[in-house]
Amino acid sequence: MEVLKHVEYNSEKQVTSINSDECEVESSSSTKEKEIVFIARPLFPQLVMMACINLGFLVFGMGLSHTAVLIPRLQEENNTFTFTDQDIASIVSVYSIISPLGFLLGGIVTDFWGRKKTIILGHVIYIVGWSTIAAAQNISTIFAGRMTEGIAKGLVLTTGIVYLDELSSSKLRPVFGNSMKIAILLGILLILGLGTFLHWRTATAIAMCGDILAIVGFFLYIPETPSWLIRKGRLRDAHTTLTKMWGPGREAEVQNDIKIISKRFNFKDNKTMIRNGKKFFSIRQIIPTTLGYMRPYILKPFFIALVFLVFQCFWGNTIITAYKVEIVTKLKGNADWMDSYVISIVATAVEIISLVILCLLLLVIGRRTMGLVSGIGMVICASILIGVLYYEVTADVVIHENAIIWVKILFFMLYNFTAMIGLGILPFIMMGEMLPSKVRGFGTGLIVAIYDVLVGVSLALYPSISNVHGIKGIFLIFGISSLFCTVFVFLFLPETHRKRLEEIETYFHQPNIMWITGNGYRKVKENEQIV
């Protein structure tokens, strides 16, 4: 059981009754600073929640790497499917290009309709996409199926990130966040294995089983998050959810959680809009609400999270995932004795191992440290791999050709390993941590929407860049991007290790922008309020 001491945030209001759905508050005249003890919620309910959420990320991983095995199999059936190189690029990239629509929709729907319902909707749409591809008789139908999956992806990922952040304890939050990436890689490994040994239609049909299990889990066990319920004034439902999370006989902890969460919201401004758990929207509030989002404490974490995530487009995370079999084929060259599919599966397994290691390390080591170690390791591995590739081209006689091939494959795997122990997962963990609670749903959706547009562009451009500059040019871009990302982490990224969301939110109220020039975290007086 985790016990963390923390300075209480006082909104000068305390929830005193949950006997109705309306929010009843009373003023507190105390102005002295005091400490309260935060006790972590029981582990088992959080593990069940994490398992159901991660089924969505598992499905996302299968969709992300589906083309790595789907395209080669379709090329083998050239008597059934007719397509061009442009068709292939479109099928690969549309999954990311169309997903911003799902991310924006998810960011809006999850704030107004709830986290739980939004995730269920996303899985239903995913099932439609998988079914469309499995039954496809032409390229256009496969393209339509990939578009449908891209929209579902936005709904599931946006809401899943927010859900994990709102229901996990501060100590376990990085582990749960890291588990999302592990689930993605397990999905990649699963679809690569299915696509290698089964017909592509069978592999696609099996993929939808993850969505079915997730829907069943949410219907039977997973509740709505108390943060969303309290924002909507539904304190009775929030009490029920927290009682389920804490277990019987923990009423004091339930009431304490309700008070802590309630202090993050300005009920004084919203009390006339909250009636019987329903929130009424006025058109006259559009402009003030929009201007309210243009505040430094919102814009600073938004752009830090955005830039940190966008770097993944350039150091190769998504490109390697979508084109892994092709990249391995180019690295091994004419070595017919080496199976590209098997090497791709092994490379994915190495990435999963690295994420398990990261899960353990994040319990004791800070985010910034792991980000810097990861970035430096990526730069070193990329530099060595680029050197070997250039040597291979310029050398008059290649000695020990098989040894050179193994060196290339080794440093390709090491590059992925070092990426996954830091920069490959930290943006997803820290995005939900850094954004303020009032814009966490919409902000997460908008960030990932922008990111996915750039992902789609990079996936579409990869074939052209690879044909012109070769695989060495691709890894040169990866290495330079890794270096810039490492510098960005050193300058701007705050340390959120074992910090509550309220503490992180308060950090961005300070005037500094760069972490290295700031004063870190400060204590918050009881008469201060986050708005």
Image (cartoon, helix red, strand yellow):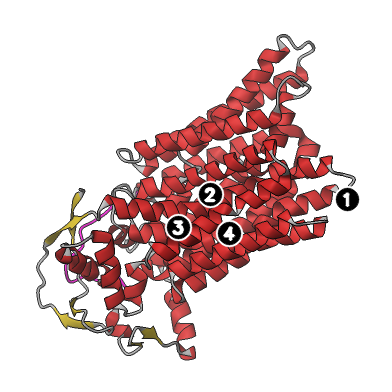
* Mark 1 or 3, nearer chain start: 1
Residue at (62% x, 19% y) in the render: 407
Q: Are marks 4 and 2 in contact (CB under 8 Å)?
A: no
* Mark 2 or 3, nearer chain start: 2
Write the start and end of the magenta stretch as one range. 517-531
Q: How far apart are labels 1 and 4 at the CA level?
A: 27 Å
Image location (x, y in percent) of residue 52: 44, 55
Report which residue position mark 1 lands on. Answer: 82
Name the amino acid, label 1: Thr
* Mark 1 or 4, nearer chain start: 1
Report which residue position mark 3 lands on. Answer: 161
Report which residue position mark 2 lands on. Answer: 58
* Mark 1 or 2, nearer chain start: 2
| Disc ID at residue 153 | 4
Q: How far apart are labels 4 and 2 at the CA level?
A: 11 Å
For residue 205, say whether it is visible.
yes
* Mark 3 or 4, nearer chain start: 4
Q: Residues within 10 Å of mark 4 (few under 14, many from 20)?
A: many
